[in-house]
Image (cartoon, rainbow, N blue to C red):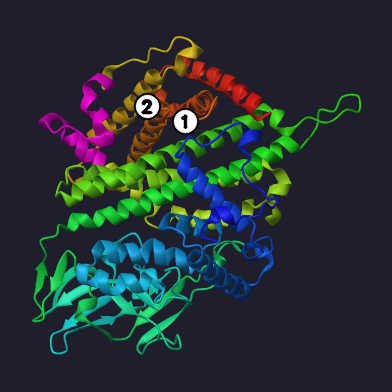
Amino acid sequence: MDGVDQLAPERKKAQFDVDEMKIVWAGSRHAFQVSDRIARLVASDPAFRKDNRAMLSRKELFKNTLRKAAYAWKRIIELRLSEEEASMLRSSVDEPAFTDLHWGMFVPAIKGQGTDEQHQKWLPLAYKMEIIGCYAQTELGHGSNVQGLETTATFDPQTDEFVIHSPTLTSSKWWPGGLGKASTHAVVYARLITDGQDHGVNGFIVQLRSLEDHSPHPGITIGDIGMKFGNGAYNTMDNGVLRFEHVRIPRNQMLMRVSQVTREGKYVQSNVPRQLLYGTMVYVRQTIVADASCALSRAVCIATRYSAVRRQFGSKNGGPETQVIDYKTQQNRLFPLLASAYAFRFVGEWLKWLYTDVTQRLQANDFSTLPEAHACTAGLKSLTTTATADGIEECRKLCGGHGYLCSSGLPELFAVYVPACTYEGDNIVLLLQVARFLMKTVSQLGYGNMPVGTTTYMGRAEQLMQCHCGVQKAEDWLNPSAILEAFEARAIRMSVACAQNLSKFTNQEEGFAELAADLVEAAVAHCQLIVVSKFIEKLQQDIPGKGVKPILEILCHIYALHLVHKHLGDFVSTGCITAKQASLANEQLRSLYSQVFTCVK
């Protein structure tokens, strides 16, 4: 049996029924087909069952995860799955595991930061899983502030080694997934010190446990940090704590793509630009955005089906009660989440293109779009994960008391997903990074520096600061240009207002701290504009599937107009729209809900 197509005996299972919902993903047909085959393979194999997960003890959970991970690797080898198919299989198992960090962080870190020689030594071992790696960056005392990390890596020229040490309690590595029980190696981030001089944070490949008996190496204190939020959920992951007591590693285990330490102990920069490291970051964040769409889609599917089946009140003459989905309040809460799932899907697809574009530019030493790409991916990671975590919780409430049961799938889905608001950058910290970029962009508008990429609209600042929304009747809100202009005007006006307020402070950092809340809101406005514009761009492409495009257009309008309603204060206070136009937007939104309701019914 060479492939998934020859396996997959059909079994009845819960899946997104595209015929019932009358909506299909408008992404790549090939990717959808591959994903569907892999999902069927996993669903039809009893070894991957998960219905009892919420009732298992922590020890049983982790043993179950080890078994599934080993079995999944066995099937990947037996079926000779491609890298894409193997990744989809691990995702379809639907269980946080140490392998997530091995493939998602450890391997990319070595690929992105290691030299060709380090690739040749370490990647074959990692690809064959002869070693299991994790990503040890976060410490007990510092997470988002990477430059504040305290772990040290001091070079000893007499032995040609680095000495890795945890000088304080707060320097303990804390949270890395896979660290607690499974990992044999880690990419450890520590302060590089040579001849008494601190050169900042760098990555080092460190062996943690013996490949013979899995015992910790001398000088290493390692363990699991304990239970996390929720039943089952992220407790399948062995998040760990790690301390070093003067642990020695060879000099060639420093990741040396962009900087090296010579045999004599001299710190030198390579001819490889440090900016190349940003490629890995863009890759990780675009993956997180894509995951947001998947998680929200699952929650919305559960809530939609429940809303269609559940009946409550409204019985006439002994007849059936009213379906919950008939209630306008249910539609008002549910359908914007459905629209958001598609919006995040399409912006995630665009981020894949952005990653390819950034990679090609970096290889050609073109760093012109890098600051914009960094801000864009940071903002979208924050926006989509926050909205998805909130959306999953809203779906739980949409299912009433039944949504609180573990058997609904929603409590565990929420508990598994909500850490995404913190890992790979705290969401508020990321928005403040976006805000700094926006303030810099605004400050350069009068000096001939034309904004690029997702900030191109800022080049029309003078026009957008003065324009007036032309909407006169509810149907005018279906015009994509009217929607885009409103979102662009809101974004630029909020950014300009923040820049003007910042200019009143003699100390810019004090001003930034004082205006942080306003700056976050400006960053959110910019990021929401990106998502809306990419949804509209998607609809301008050739979309396969009869009747799909009109439904996606409805969802696009729902996503945009719901944001107008939700952030009405921004749109009206900045003069982007009038109170009358806001009322027309709500009128059109109610009409769009009715159209989606007809499709779902």
Q: Is residue 455 magenta?
A: yes
| In-front residue for pair 339/601 | 601
The answer to whether residue 420 is visible is yes
Say if mark 1 contacts mark 2, CB within 8 Å: yes
The mark nearer the N terminus, 1 or 2, is 2
Q: Is residue 70 magenta?
A: no
The answer to whether residue 227 is visible is no
Residue displayed at 66% across by 69% down: 56
Q: Position of residue 330 (x, y in %)?
A: 65, 33
What residue does disc 2 label? Answer: 487
Amino acid type of the residue that numbered disc 2 sits on in the rendered structure: Phe
Residue 563, label in figure: 1
> Mark 1: which secondary structure?
helix
Q: Position of residue 437 (x, y in %)?
A: 24, 42
For the C terminus, give its image quadrant. top right
Quadrant of residue 41 in the image? bottom right
- Start and end of the magenta stretch? 436-464
